[in-house]
Amino acid sequence: MSFFSFGQSAEIDIVLNDAETRKKVEHKTEDGKKDKYFLFYDGETVSGKVNLTLKNPGKRLEHLGIKIEFIGQIELYYDRGNHHEFVSLVKDLARPGELPQSQTFDFEFMHVEKPYESYTGQNVKLRYFLRATISRRLNDICKEMDIVVHTLSTYPELNSSIKMEVGIEDCLHIEFEYNKSKYHLKDVIVGKIYFLLVRIKIKHMEIDIIKRETTGTGPNVYHENDTIAKYEIMDGAPVRGESIPIRLFLAGYELTPTMRDINKKFSVRYYLNLVLIDEEERRYFKQQEITLWRKGDIVRKSMSHQAAIASQRFEGSSSTESKMQAQAKQDGN
Amino acid sequence: MSEATVADTRRLNSKPQDLTDAYGPPSNFLEIDVFNPQTVGVGRNRYTTYEVRMRTNLPIFKLKESCVRRRYSDFEWLKNELERDSKIVVPPLPGKALKRQLPFRGDEGIFEESFIEERRQGLEQFINKIAGHPLAQNERCLHMFLQEDTIDRNYIPGKVRQ
């Protein structure tokens, strides 16, 4: 701000038109704190008002133009100077001149393209924000307002299960299976580990969710691995023929959708790591990539179908399927 | 028609476990004892040997039971062979006790009972850790150490296949 007490200054305030009705979501900031921001989706219009309040009410504010921008940018922490803007829209609010008193300007960015999801990571940040600027000779006055964008997907057409047999020859053979390869953020990983051959003394087995953030290109590729979750699925020594079930609820963990090569700048991928630990603390592991996607919230039209599934879970499994089919037929009538 | 929004968390289908697999003998039985230390030789050429007895049902070992006598330098030989040929991090041996081999000691030096017992325990831990490692089980030197009467130091190093 200006160090001189003479001269005029102004405060800028950006207010969205739908501030009352629009949903806010929590998003992590660079220093780890969580703040709430307005949530937008791709194609939505961003409209509102810019309120300029003069600091000294009597004087006029001389300026070289007032504008508002909508920006989507990627910032690599090791290269702070270069911001890669992939969305940049400008609306001029006032031509160079004088502002005699506090004033409010309307703005509207129609059907703005927001192709990527907001992301704050270890080495990279992707953010969307509105920036209102009063240009002046010596120093500009500006105000930024961050928003959060979520990218939604629908149920993938092809979602095959992951099934593999792995092991160390003559020592340990297992067959692992995960029910899907693509999971939404509130999904459940249902799977099983089947022991075909056990000749080492296993102490316990766990499944980890690992997030890998990749930034940079060519020779400067940098991977940052973060273990988001560790979930013990077996305690004790298994024998041949045993099957250990897996049921891992993803809603409890801080996850983002899988992001592949965003604007050719970074990727965020997720892996399931199956780890077996033996009596000598040796670790045997198998890593498998999974795709995470964000499901849109849907309004539940009828509770009866859900209630039917929930009540049948406590009955014998053999009769469940036939009962569910009977219920569906009833609903159809 | 409403969509089912409750996730299906039922277990995946699995073959029921065979009772012989469930209640049969474990396929990973491996026990090695290092015991019965005996000092052989006279005067300055004395040394201590230990009995190394192995019981196992792991198919990679030819003999399911074996019993051999080994001395400390044999264990050192095994450690060096494994460090050179296998990719494992070899656990440490109990100490060489050079100070105990110097003259003018008040006690029996390396033939002191308490020292032998300490060393015996260290050797037992060492050999059990190694023999249990899947990568060490592939080495010819380990099999020769555990199951052949004498160690042929001019052997051809290599891997064992089933």
Image: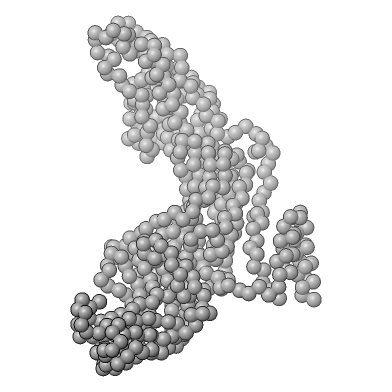
Considering the image in quadrants, where does the C terminus of chain A appear?
bottom right
Coordinates of residue A245 in the picture (x, y in percent): 61, 50
Identify the image quadrant of residue A91: bottom left
Front-most of residues A190 and A107: A107
**Residue at point 48% right, 75% down?**
A39
* A307 lies left or right of B158: right
- Say if A267 sits above or below A319 in the image: below
Indicate left or right for A80 with A130 as reference.
Answer: left
In this rendering, is residue B22 above or below A55? above
Q: Position of residue B103 (x, y in %)?
A: 24, 10
Residue at the (34%, 88%) spot, across then down: A102
Kindly identify the residue that appears in the image at 32 percent across and 75 percent down.
A84
* Vertical relation: B46 (above or below) A33: above
Q: Position of residue B91 (x, y in %)?
A: 38, 32
Write the residue at 53% across / 39% down: A203
Farthest residue to the top: give it.
B43
Quadrant assignment for the N terminus of chain A: bottom left
Task: Tell me, yes or no, if residue A166 can be seen here.
Answer: no
Q: How is the image coloured?
A: one colour
Out of B53 and A42, give the one closest to the viewer.
A42
Nearer-the-camera pick, A169 or B161: A169
Marker count (numbered): 0
